[in-house]
Image (cartoon, rainbow, N blue to C red):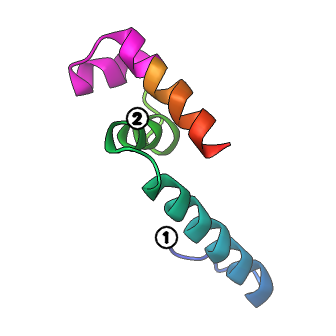
Amino acid sequence: DLPDPGLGPEATALQRERADAVRRALLTLPHDFRVAVVLRDVNQLSYEEMAEALSVPLGTVKSRISRARVLLA
């Protein structure tokens, strides 16, 4: 991620720290949960789109997202 050119040095550093913290947190998740969170929150896929892309039932997608959020909390 490139820093926003309109941000000052302190805000840019804070933005980088937050992005690094998010990456580290995602890496703690099991692979299937991490993929689900990235598809939902980064790629902004719907649950239905995720189920189709992952070839899993809709309930599995919802469960993975829910369990991932618990682990990230």
- Name which residue lies at 30% across and 11% down: 57
| Residue type of the residue flagged with mark 1 | Asp
| Left or right position of 43 against 8 | left
Residue 4 is at least partly visible in this image: no
Note whether 6 is above or below 55 in the view shown: below
Foreground disc of the pair 2, 1: 2
Residue 40 is at least partly visible in this image: yes
Note whether 62 is above or below 73 in the view shown: above
Label 2 sits on residue: 36
Residue 72, located in which quarter of the rendered image? top right
- What whole-number distance in Å separates the C-alpha atoms at marks 2 and 1? 20 Å
Estimate the x, y position of residue 50 in percent, counting from the top left: 35, 25
| Left or right position of 59 against 6 | left
Q: Which residues are magenta?
A: 47-62
Judged from this view, the residue extending furthest toward the bottom is: 9
Does the segment drawn in magenta span residue 39? no
Q: Are marks 2 and 1 in contact (CB under 8 Å)?
A: no
Mark on residue 61? none
- Principal SS element in the magenta part? helix
Residue 51, located in which quarter of the rendered image? top left
Estimate the x, y position of residue 19 in percent, counting from the top left: 59, 66
Q: Residues within 10 Å of mark 2 (few under 14, many from 20)?
A: many
Estimate the x, y position of residue 33 in percent, counting from the top left: 41, 37
Determine the secondary structure under disc 1: loop
Note whether 70 is above or below 13 in the view shown: above
Estimate the x, y position of residue 31 in percent, counting from the top left: 33, 44
User: Where is the C terminus found, in terms of image quarters?
Assistant: top right
Label 1 sits on residue: 1
Q: How many marks?
A: 2
| Residue type of the residue flagged with mark 2 | Ala
| Left or right position of 40 against 11 | left
